[in-house]
Amino acid sequence: MSPLRMIYLALAVWGALHPAFWHIKWFMAEGVSLSGLLVGWHASAASTALAWDLAIAAIALTVWVLAEVSVRRNWAALWAIPATFLIGLSCGLPLYLFLRTRPVD
């Protein structure tokens, strides 16, 4: 595996674990409430801007993944879509880059 692919994979793992730590910490303090989490995302203008920024970037990544998969037939790259929406963009984007840069058969 190339050094670049190892970096992408490490970033995907970090992007899954680090935000999860903060989500777990928040859930332990506030209770497990998705509606409460959504309220937290819109607690201020800054957090609302960040939430929209991430949502728009996640949608853009999804469009990119779908467009490239339809051309390159790299079906494994589709894993980046659920990773993005179930874990976060910080995991989905580097995961997609990792899957996209695999050696061609």
Image (cartoon, grey):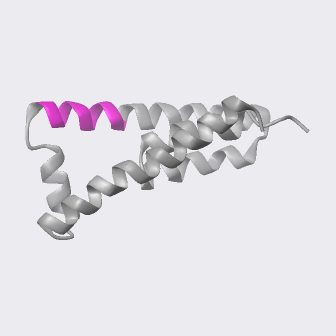
Q: Say which quadrant the N terminus sits in.
A: top right
Position of 87 compared to 33: left or right?
A: right
Relative to the observer, which residue lies in front, 55 or 97? 97
Position of 23 compared to 8: left or right?
A: left
| Residue at image point 52% right, 53% down | 82
| Residue at image point 28% right, 62% down | 24
Q: Position of residue 6 (x, y in %)?
A: 66, 38
Q: Is residue 82 magenta?
A: no
Q: Position of residue 89 (x, y in %)?
A: 43, 41
| Residue at image point 55% right, 37% down | 94
Up-down: is 1 above or below 88?
A: above
Up-down: is 33 above or below 20?
A: below
Q: Position of residue 65 (x, y in %)?
A: 61, 36
Up-down: is 52 above or below 23?
A: above
Q: Which residues are magenta?
A: 46-55
Q: Is residue 53 magenta?
A: yes
